[in-house]
Amino acid sequence: MARLLLAVVLFLALPALAQEDPGLDRRVTNLAHELRCLVCQNQTLADSNADLAVDLRNQIREQLKAGKSERDVIDFMVARYGDFVLYRPPFKASTAALWLGPFVLLALGAWLLLRRLRQRTPQRELTEAERRRAAKLLE
Amino acid sequence: MKTAAIVAIFVALIGLLAVGLRLDPREVPSPLIGKPAPAFELPLLHAPDKTFSQKELLGSVWVMNVWASWCQPCLVEHPVVSELARSGIAPVVGLNYKDAREDALPWLKRNGDPFKFTVSDSAGRIGIDYGVYGVPETYVIDRKGVIRYKHIGPLTPEIAQKLRALIQELASGG
């Protein structure tokens, strides 16, 4: 019984043991969500369990612990892996199409739709004879 | 007129997709090209009490090949790397990445050791400085210690040919 109790207490204490510094953990996780895992490219560093992702998360933790800012860590990663490492690419000449493209397409679509709607010929009213025939068909 | 427009849009879309499919998302352009090779001082694989720093090769064009015994593609490219090293066109230095000495040494014994020497980056820290994310990777570093080329993935004879041309150009003062 005493052993069981000890096990339960230890189990409940686990999260506390794991997080010696929850503030730092949160900062590491937030940053890891912003950065791409280069090995499995559609995952963030936070989501990936690839060896390199683990190393890079440790790298983030170490640098933040040493008093570096989020900006410093991001610069560190970009200097090594390029803009590709950022999940939100910066806006510059080479990425303009990426950021503006969807809006351009949306505007084009809206313009085409409007043009079409305007060109539509107004519907002709039914004549009395047609109305009677329709009523008959519906009966 | 209308059909022509639809066909034009369709063809444009197919063209776009065809180009998109051909691009390799693994070919991440390295921001390190044209930058000085990151400094390091690492123990030699064969003599861990001695170290090598990239500074020692200042003044010559050299090649750095990142490999590991656990990496299958490294085994595939090994004959190509060996031939490049044997041709004597430039010293080829091995960077043994995230590997254990007791695995790396037998690997070299088994497959041949073409490297001028190999340094151990067992923790993978220098790998991070060089932006390594998929072994094998190969770098060409010029006489001023600047990275001029980086290849990700196994070296093929075609790429080795390209490297040779680049090395020759760099060595003759380029």
Image (spheres, rainbow, N blue to C red):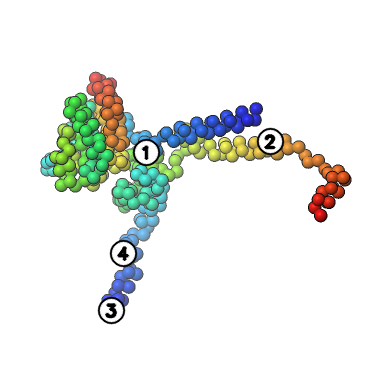
> Which residue in the protein does label 1 denote?
B26
At x 25% / y 35%, what residue is drawn? B77
Amino acid type, residue under disc 3 in the picture: Ala
Q: Badge 4 sits on which subunit? A: A
Q: Nearer the viewer, mark 3 or mark 2?
A: 2
Q: How many marks?
A: 4
Residue B121 in sight from this viewpoint: no
Residue B52: image location, x then y, percent? 17, 37
Under tag 3, what secondary structure? Answer: helix
Q: Are marks 1 and 4 on the same chain?
A: no
Question: How far apart are labels 1 and 3 at the CA level?
Answer: 56 Å
Q: Quadrant of the N terminus of chain A?
A: bottom left
Q: Nearer the viewer, mark 3 or mark 4?
A: 3
Q: Badge 1 sits on which subunit? A: B
> Which residue in the protein does label 4 denote?
A17
Q: Earlier in the sequence, mark 3 or mark 4?
A: 3
Residue B65: image location, x then y, percent? 24, 35
Farthest top residue?
A: B172
